């Protein structure tokens, strides 16, 4: 992951400078663009492995930049947006962004998102591992077997579908709509409440203490995220 | 006698004439039944009785007619030679002349008595009408009062239609009408200056003074395209030489309008002017109050901005400045502490700004919750988890009832409500204390409570707790902007829900909000 080339499209100089400095220090090669046009122009020359895209740009809409980038290839894109703009985040994710960061964000969060997005891009052609592990949770995709701390958890096909969809994108957010279409089918679109309710059931089965959840995190108004790389036991 | 004021002039006279003639004819027939010697002595007394009855019952003109008719009839039927108007005996002349004088005097006196009685009744009636109108106009806001007044006036005058229009320069406009829609429509549409019959300014009747009605002015317009009906009148509603509107009355074709009606309309117009003036003052007072509150809110906002935004900024600036000091040899722990101060204070600033934005969206009415069916357990548990990460030594305990059902909520906004309530509870409790988050469903109403074991809420503060920038004396000691609870209230109310605060019997405060789902959860979610 280290040494990857990252293009940051962000018009605020202070944010751009801080983000670029931090990522450089962590071994990434950085390029910064202050406008959408400049960003699109630099994408091809710079051959970015990842694009960090601010949705609020001074010249063209961040969504237009997102569309153009998606039309050119599948470089991972993490969008930067503000709190309260949940609809924008969902729209960006459904339009092909891989993840998002809510401004203001901390450096730890920035690094985590960047690493997850780069790892997914690297892994996607070969497919996921046969077994997913995070903390006490293990998912054996071949045997469709889910265990928590070695104990088998019996899931319905829908619950298993949700969990494996989240695991395939572990660390990244999946929108309600993305989950709905992956688990229920492409003909579904507005039945987001199926996802909300089944996700609550799934969590009750997975978590030892459902009032202190560890594995699944909700992103209010956006979707769900399965946390990866959890320490095996607390 | 409850006659309509706009009575028919010609037909009233014919009725009086008929009553007088019939009464005299009947009396004559009765007298003719008596033995002849009794005719002369009792005739004048019996006729006088008839005149008395007629003038009491049918008025002055009828009495006078009866007096003359009975004189002629007496002469014709009862004095010798009969069936002529000549009289033989001189003493009979005297008797007849005396009779006619007495009859006229009696009829005049009775009629006068009757008129006084009628006048008194009318006055009583008018003052009752006036009293009713005053009540109507005082009891409602202008629009409703005008409608009621128009209705009452229509009934009182027996008019075809009544239209009241208020169009003051100060922006109070209202229209009310009663009676025939077609007639009212014509008067409503007519320009203020287009009436042909307008009541001039007179004196309104008051307690002791009967009032001097203004004169009717028939206005002949230079051209005939005015469109104002001929059998209608318009009374301007004026106050201190300012025209506030007008009152139009149209009566049935052939009716007429007299002095009493003019006085009545003038008085009513005066009442309407008073009511309009009152409404104007009310509107102005309301505007002033809104301005005052806006100003208050602005100054509170300024206070909050200057104090609550500057406090974290002071920490950030001081810490960042310290880190840049080159002549001091900071230890790694020192540096870490400065950095974490910057981070924490910036996050606090971020929360305040977020709440300010929410508040402005709430107050601007721009809040449209994106409601969908959610299992509240996920959201509540995650909100508690997020608060725990900054809660230090507090224990945040989540208790969800097993009957908790999906609810129709905007997850971002409800998450904000729960977070604000939890942060508020943490602020008012000591480290190590418990903060309890509970939730249950009842009749498709989601009920969420946040309880703490802090000092509780001062009783005087309970009412004002949810006002923006309101802070109790004790909460002024804790960091915060007085925005969290106001935002929580706004968000809950945008969901059609309610929020309240109370003190727990065992000590500590309890905040409860409830969100109704307008329909039961869909089958698929059960």
Image (cartoon, coloured by chain):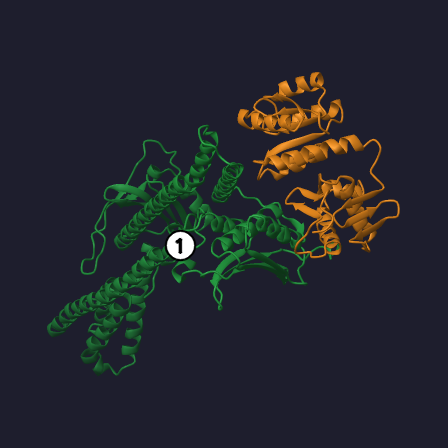
Chain colours: A orange, B green
x then y, percent, for residue A96: 72, 32
Q: Is residue B138 visible?
A: yes
Give left or right: position of B288 versus A103. left
Give left or right: position of B206 versus B169. left
Residue A173 occupies which quadrant of the picture? top right
Give left or right: position of A163 versus A109. right
The N terminus of chain A is located in which quarter? top right
- Asked whether B457 or B16 is in front, the reply is B457
Give left or right: position of B246 versus B496. left
Residue plotted at (41% across, 49% down): B176
Residue plotted at (63% across, 38% down): A87
x then y, percent, for residue A150: 81, 54
* Circle 1 residue: B472
x then y, percent, for residue A125: 83, 31
Parent chain of label 1: B
Circle 1 sits in a helix, a strand or a loop, which is it?
Answer: loop
Residue plotted at (66% across, 42% down): A222
Binning the other alpha carbons within 10 Å of mark 1 as few (below 14), some (14 to 19) or many (20 upward) gives: some
- Please say if B516 is above or below B484: below
Residue B69 occupies which quadrant of the picture? bottom left
x then y, percent, for residue A100: 65, 35
- Please say if B71 is above or below A131: below
- Please say if B353 is above or below B384: above
Residue plotted at (19% across, 78% down): B40
Residue B195 occupies which quadrant of the picture? top left
- Asked whether B363 or A198 is in front, the reply is A198
- The total number of labels drawn is 1
- Asked whether B36 or A88 is in front, the reply is A88
Q: Is residue B450 visible?
A: no
């Amino acid at each position: 992951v280290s040494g990857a080339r990252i293009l940051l499209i962000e018009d605020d100089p202070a944010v751009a400078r801080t983000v670029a400095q931090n990522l450089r220090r962590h071994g990434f090669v950085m390029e910064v663009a202050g406008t959408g046009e400049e960003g699109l122009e630099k994408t091809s020359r710079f051959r970015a492995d990842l694009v960090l895209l601010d949705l609020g740009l001074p010249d063209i809409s961040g969504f237009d930049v997102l569309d153009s980038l998606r039309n050119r290839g599948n470089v991972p894109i993490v969008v930067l947006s503000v709190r309260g703009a949940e609809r924008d985040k969902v729209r960006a994710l459904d339009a092909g962004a891989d993840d998002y960061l809510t401004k203001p964000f901390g450096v730890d969060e920035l690094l985590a998102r960047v690493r997850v997005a780069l790892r997914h891009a690297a892994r996607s052609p070969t497919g996921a591992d046969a077994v997913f592990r995070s903390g006490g949770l293990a998912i054996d995709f071949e045997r469709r077997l889910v265990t928590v701390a070695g104990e088998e958890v019996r899931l319905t096909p829908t619950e298993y579908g949700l969990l494996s969809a989240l695991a395939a994108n572990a660390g990244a957010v999946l929108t309600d709509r993305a989950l709905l279409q992956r688990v229920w089918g492409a003909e579904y679109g507005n039945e987001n409440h199926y996802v909300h309710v089944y996700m609550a059931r799934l969590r009750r089965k997975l978590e030892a203490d459902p009032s202190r959840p560890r594995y699944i995190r909700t992103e209010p108004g956006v979707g769900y995220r399965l946390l990866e790389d959890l320490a095996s036991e607390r | 006698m409850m006659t309509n004021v706009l009575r028919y002039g010609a037909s009233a006279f014919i009725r009086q004439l008929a009553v007088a003639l019939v009464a005299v004819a009947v009396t004559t027939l009765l007298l003719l039944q008596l033995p002849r010697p009794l005719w002369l002595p009792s005739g004048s007394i019996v006729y006088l009785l008839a005149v008395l009855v007629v003038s009491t019952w049918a008025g002055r003109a009828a009495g006078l007619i009866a007096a003359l008719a009975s004189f002629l009839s007496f002469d014709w039927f009862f004095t010798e030679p009969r069936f002529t108007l000549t009289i033989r005996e001189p003493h009979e002349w005297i008797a007849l002349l005396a009779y006619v004088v007495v009859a006229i005097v009696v009829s005049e006196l009775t009629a006068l008595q009757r008129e006084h009685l009628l006048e008194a009744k009318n006055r009583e009636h008018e003052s009752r009408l006036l009293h009713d109108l005053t009540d109507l106009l005082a009891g409602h806001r202008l629009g409703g009062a005008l409608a009621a007044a128009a209705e009452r006036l229509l009934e009182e005058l027996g008019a075809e239609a009544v239209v009241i229009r208020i169009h003051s320069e100060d922006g109070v406009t209202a229209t009310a009408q009663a009676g025939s829609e077609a007639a009212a429509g014509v008067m409503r549409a007519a320009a203020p200056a287009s009436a042909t019959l307008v009541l001039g300014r007179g004196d309104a009747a008051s307690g002791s003074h009967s009032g001097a009605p203004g004169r009717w002015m028939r206005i002949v317009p230079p051209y005939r395209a005015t469109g104002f009906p001929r059998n209608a009148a318009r009374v301007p509603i004026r106050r201190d030489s300012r025209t506030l509107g007008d009152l139009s009355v149209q009566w049935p074709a052939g009716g007429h309008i007299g002095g009493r009606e003019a006085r009545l309309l003038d008085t009513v117009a005066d009442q309407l002017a008073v009511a309009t003036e009152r409404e104007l003052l009310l509107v102005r007072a309301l505007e002033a109050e809104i301005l005052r509150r806006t100003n208050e809110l602005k100054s509170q906002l300024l206070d909050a901005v200057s104090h609550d935004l500057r406090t974290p900024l002071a920490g950030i600036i001081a810490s960042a400045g310290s880190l840049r000091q080159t002549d001091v040899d900071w230890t790694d722990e020192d540096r870490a502490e400065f950095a974490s101060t910057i981070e924490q204070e910036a996050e606090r600033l971020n929360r305040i700004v977020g709440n300010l934005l929410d508040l402005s969206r709430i107050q601007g009415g721009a809040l449209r919750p994106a409601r969908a069916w959610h299992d509240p357990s996920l959201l509540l548990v995650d909100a508690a988890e997020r608060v725990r990460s900054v809660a230090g030594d507090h224990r945040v305990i989540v208790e969800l009832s097993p009957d908790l059902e999906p609810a129709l909520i905007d997850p971002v906004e409800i998450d904000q409500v729960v977070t604000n309530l939890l942060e508020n509870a943490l602020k008012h409790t000591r480290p190590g204390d418990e903060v309890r988050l509970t939730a249950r469903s009842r009749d498709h109403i989601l009920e969420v409570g946040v309880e703490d074991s802090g000092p509780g809420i001062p009783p005087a503060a309970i009412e004002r707790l949810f006002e923006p920038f309101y802070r109790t004396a004790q909460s002024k000691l804790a960091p915060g902007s007085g925005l969290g609870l106001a935002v929580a209230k706004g968000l809950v109310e945008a969901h059609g829900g309610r929020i309240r605060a109370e003190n727990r019997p065992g000590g500590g405060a309890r905040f409860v909000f409830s969100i109704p789902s307008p329909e039961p959860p869909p089958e698929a979610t059960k």
